[in-house]
Image (cartoon, grey):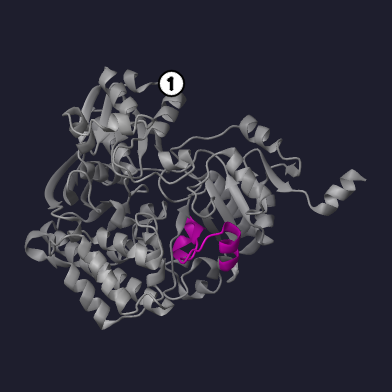
């Protein structure tokens, strides 16, 4: 039974993973630990998350039985004498230290491609014994944009590779380049464009323009034409000259056109795949393109597949985890596995939390009680939930979440003001799993909905009951289905609120302010309480709030 580390060298979303005896023990992203978004930089490696996992497990990289390395181009080029300047340029970074640790390790080192790691991170966690596996992203060091693989038992067989002639034949690239004209940051804010799209309208000029940039070639499962990726910059500059980015309506119409174009191409692509492999009724997805939850809904509603699964770490944070899983499969440890939850980070104990609380004299602590939490939510209070191990992937799933009742239409604007955000998409609902079918039109794919990676259409009778978590235009929501067996704290909170309100739904957004990754450290969440971002901080060890001025005056008299 092996101890396995997974490390990866993608261009962004760096992470580390640890598997022991065929079970995932940790999967952690660097950006959460660094308190800032991981830089997109050639030569960076996941040193901080790796060190933290080594400290938590007591197993160093040198002591592992296997090391799975994903996205190996950078490593190979360094070993072969290229990029030696990195040692000087980035000597304060973790790359050289990590490579040297790998060299010194007695572990068997296994190398895996970027897209094989993506595929492993979804198929081997889906619970499917047989499935199609599709990966798509904006490209990588290995010059691949995607793959189609067949999953059977413990075997994955690659049957098609989408080569990266240039980035321009990638659907994801068109999203990256649209961020800047809309005032967003590429590789970070593409989801905001998806949110804008719901407010846009069809425009023939835009639809024709996007179609001229990228189309699907049914004959060879590819996208083209294979022009340079700067063609997108050129196209968006033409739209700028035409005035599309000068008005709010113009912006949302461009977003609508790109979203619709993406959905149409994905449907063409997947119809072709389904017809070629008709015996495969389940399908798994990974890669940055599938962070688009509206695309995932369209796929789910195609009717070609019984179930879809999108891994909770669909972006490049899954490269290290996928490499570790592949090594576990290869050494014979891995068994069929259905991911129960994504709480694969670290937790902080009662002493650590209380020591941080003592630094703030203005705080009051009361005992933790589910009924009390539900009462506060029913009163309209904003609560920060800080409990257990933090989540893997971009979604807050009840470990580092902000909770509010979903019954108030004005909640969206109020939360944006509190969090200093400018969220366009509605905030997400979390809903009791056994009640979800009564509220949303859910047809399959319930497992992926546990990780908030798909949207569904809300049933008409519920739209006005939970307006804070439903898109105003298309009546969709991105629910997290919550169950007691794998998310007991979150479940019990929602259930107690349901008893009081008759609403089995609450609003869930990530516990962070604008520009921050999800907060994981005690000092971060207490600062948000002190700064008034949340009204109450809920932990397993107590509920904290700031003294009101009348309380302070009374205590001082």
Q: Residue furthest right?
A: 557
Circle 1: element type: loop
Whether residue 553 sits left or right of residue 531 in the image: it is right
**Residue drawn at the location 62% of the way across and 32% of the way down:** 352
Vertical side of 365 occupied by 172: above or below: below
Question: 280 or 23, which is in the foreground?
Answer: 23
The boundaries of the magenta stretch are 413-438
Residue 492 location in percent, x, y?
58, 49
Whether residue 268 sits left or right of residue 63 in the image: it is left
Q: Residue furthest bottom?
A: 204
Q: Residue beneath label 1, please? A: 58
**Residue drawn at the location 54% of the way across and 67% of the way down:** 468
Query: Which quarter of the figure has residue 266?
Result: bottom left
Query: Which quarter of the figure has residue 387?
Result: top right
Quarter of the figure that contains the N terminus? top left
Question: 494 or 532, which is in the foreground?
Answer: 532
**Residue drawn at the location 43% of the way across and 21% of the way down:** 58
Whether residue 54 sits left or right of residue 262 in the image: it is right
Residue 392 on the magenta segment: no
**Residue 294 seen by the camera:** no
Query: Which quarter of the figure has residue 175?
Result: bottom left
Residue 121 location in percent, x, y?
29, 43
Question: 258 or 311, which is in the foreground?
Answer: 258
């Amino acid at each position: 039974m092996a101890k396995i580390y997974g490390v990866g060298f993608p261009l962004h979303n760096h992470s580390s993973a640890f598997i022991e005896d065929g079970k995932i023990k940790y999967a952690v992203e660097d950006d959460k630990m660094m308190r800032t978004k991981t830089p997109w930089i050639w030569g960076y490696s996941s040193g901080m998350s790796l060190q933290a996992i080594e400290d938590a497990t007591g197993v160093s990289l040198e002591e592992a039985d296997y090391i799975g390395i994903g996205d190996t181009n950078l490593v190979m080029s360094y070993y072969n004498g290229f990029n030696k300047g990195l040692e000087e340029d980035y000597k304060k970074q973790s790359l050289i230290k990590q490579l040297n640790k790998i060299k010194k390790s007695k572990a068997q080192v296994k190398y895996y491609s970027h897209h094989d790691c993506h595929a492993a991170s979804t198929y081997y966690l889906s619970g499917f014994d047989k499935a199609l596996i599709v990966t798509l992203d904006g490209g990588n060091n290995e010059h691949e944009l995607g793959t189609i693989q067949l999953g059977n038992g413990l075997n994955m067989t690659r049957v098609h590779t989408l080569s990266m002639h240039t980035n321009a034949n990638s659907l994801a690239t068109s999203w990256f380049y649209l961020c800047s004209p809309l005032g967003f940051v590429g590789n970070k804010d593409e989801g905001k464009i998806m949110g804008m799209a719901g407010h846009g309208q069809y425009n023939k000029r835009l639809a024709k323009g996007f179609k001229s940039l990228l189309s699907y070639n049914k004959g060879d499962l590819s996208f083209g034409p294979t022009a340079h990726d700067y063609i997108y910059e050129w196209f968006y500059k033409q739209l700028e000259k035409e005035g599309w980015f000068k008005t709010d309506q113009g912006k949302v119409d461009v977003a609508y056109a790109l979203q619709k174009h993406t959905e149409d191409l994905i449907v063409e692509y997947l119809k072709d795949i389904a017809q070629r492999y008709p015996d495969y009724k389940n399908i798994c997805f990974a890669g940055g393109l599938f962070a688009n939850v509206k695309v995932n809904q369209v796929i789910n509603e195609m009717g070609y597949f019984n179930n879809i699964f999108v891994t909770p770490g669909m972006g490049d944070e899954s490269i290290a985890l996928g490499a570790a899983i592949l090594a576990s499969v290869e050494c014979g440890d891995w068994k069929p596995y259905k991911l129960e939850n994504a709480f694969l980070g670290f937790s902080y104990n009662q002493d650590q939390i209380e020591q941080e609380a003592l630094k703030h004299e203005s705080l009051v602590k009361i005992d933790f009680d589910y009924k009390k939490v539900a009462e506060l939510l029913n009163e309209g209070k904003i609560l920060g939930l800080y409990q257990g191990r933090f989540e893997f992937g971009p979604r807050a799933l009840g470990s580092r979440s902000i909770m509010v009742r979903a019954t108030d239409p004005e909640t969206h604007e109020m939360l944006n003001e509190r969090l200093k955000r400018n969220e366009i998409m509605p905030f997400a609902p979390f809903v009791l799993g056994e009640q979800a079918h009564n509220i949303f039109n859910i047809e399959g794919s319930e497992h992926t909905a546990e990780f908030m990676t798909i949207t569904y259409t809300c049933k008409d009778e519920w739209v006005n009951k939970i307006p804070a978590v439903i898109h105003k235009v298309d009546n969709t929501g991105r629910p997290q289905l919550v169950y007691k067996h794998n998310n007991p704290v979150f479940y019990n909170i929602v259930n107690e609120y349901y008893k009081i309100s008759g609403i089995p739904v609450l609003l869930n957004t990530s516990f962070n302010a604008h520009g921050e990754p999800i907060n994981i450290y005690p000092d971060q969440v207490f600062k948000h309480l002190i700064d008034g971002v949340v009204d109450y901080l809920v932990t397993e060890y107590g509920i904290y709030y700031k003294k009101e001025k009348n309380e302070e005056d009374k205590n001082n008299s």
